[in-house]
Image (cartoon, grey):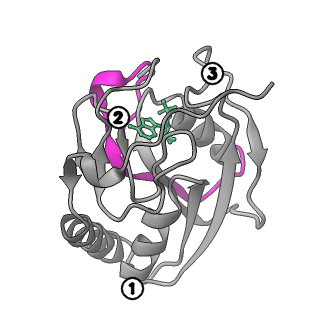
């Protein structure tokens, strides 16, 4: 059933939470930390489509150890993931990860439902190790106990767009991370 798109709000009118320069500096530093921690190893970065695409692209370029990347996609219903926790995988990884050092790369750790689901899924593939990198963390919104190993920024419960993150599929290409004037329903 077709639903009307929300009214378009110019992203320039929204407040900047993190500028592209602040994001770049933080991603570089996480990349350096990962490179130091995995020195001499190979790692597989698994990005969660579509929101993590920008973060993964920048993170991969700031990691100096041998790395490959893959993508997964999970179902979402409009903006809100199924609150029962019944997250569904709609695109799996392309290559085996058994025995590999894996880092799941996500845009936002919010309720934690998506990453809990993905972590369980990935553990079934028996990786040598499994960590989580997220660009943003909203600890106040957590419904299940899960923490990321690498976090660029921890933020309060405000709905943000830009740097891969969307509202109704819009604004992913906005370079800075900006705050929507109002949180959408369910957030
Ligand atoms: P959760 O941790 O399972 O609740 O899901 C996190 C997902 O919800 C993220 O990957 C985003 O796609 C989406 N999300 C949560 N908060 C925001 C936001 O502020 N802006 C854009 N997407 C969000």
Q: Is residue 164 left or right of residue 141?
A: right
Residue at mark 2: 159
Figure quadrant of the C terminus: top left
Q: Which residues are magenta?
A: 124-149
Residue drawn 52% across the image and 52% down it: 51
Q: Is the CB–ligand 1 distance for label 2 below 8 Å?
A: yes
Nearer-the-camera pick, 96 or 162: 162
Figure quadrant of the N terminus: top right
Residue at mark 3: 82
Label annotation for residue 145: none
Asked whether the residues under the numbered discs 2 and 1 touch, taking CB atoms below 8 Å apart as contact, a structural biologist would say: no
Residue 140 belongs to the span the image colors magenta: yes
Residue drawn 36% across the image and 80% down it: 62
**x and y, in percent, of residue 116 in the image:** 54, 33
**x and y, in percent, of residue 79 in the image:** 56, 31
Mark before the other along the chain sequence, 2 or 1: 1
Q: Is residue 78 above or below residue 31?
A: above
Nearer-the-camera pick, 68 or 56: 56
Residue 149 visible in the picture: no
Residue at mark 1: 64
Q: Is the CB–ligand 1 distance for label 1 below 8 Å?
A: no
**x and y, in percent, of residue 120 in the image:** 62, 37
Residue drawn 45% across the image and 18% down it: 185
């Amino acid at each position: 059933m077709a639903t009307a798109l929300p009214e378009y709000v110019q992203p320039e009118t929204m407040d900047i939470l993190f500028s592209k320069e602040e994001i770049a500096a933080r991603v570089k530093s996480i990349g350096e930390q990962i490179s130091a921690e995995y020195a001499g190893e190979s790692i597989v970065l698994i990005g969660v489509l579509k929101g993590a695409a920008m973060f993964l692209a920048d993170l991969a370029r700031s990691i100096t150890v041998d790395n490959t990347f893959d993508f997964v996609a999970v179902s979402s219903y409009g903006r809100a993931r199924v609150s029962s926790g019944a997250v569904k995988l709609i695109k799996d990884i392309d290559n085996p990860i058994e025995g590999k050092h894996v880092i799941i790369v996500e845009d936002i750790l919010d309720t934690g439902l998506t990453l809990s689901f993905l972590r369980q899924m990935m553990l079934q593939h028996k990786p040598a190790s499994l960590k989580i990198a997220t660009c943003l963390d909203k600890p106040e919104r957590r419904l299940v106990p899960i923490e990321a190993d690498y976090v660029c920024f921890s933020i309060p419960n405000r709905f943000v767009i830009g740097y891969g993150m969307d509202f109704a599929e819009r604004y992913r290409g906005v370079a800075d991370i900006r705050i929507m004037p109002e949180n959408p329903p369910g957030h």
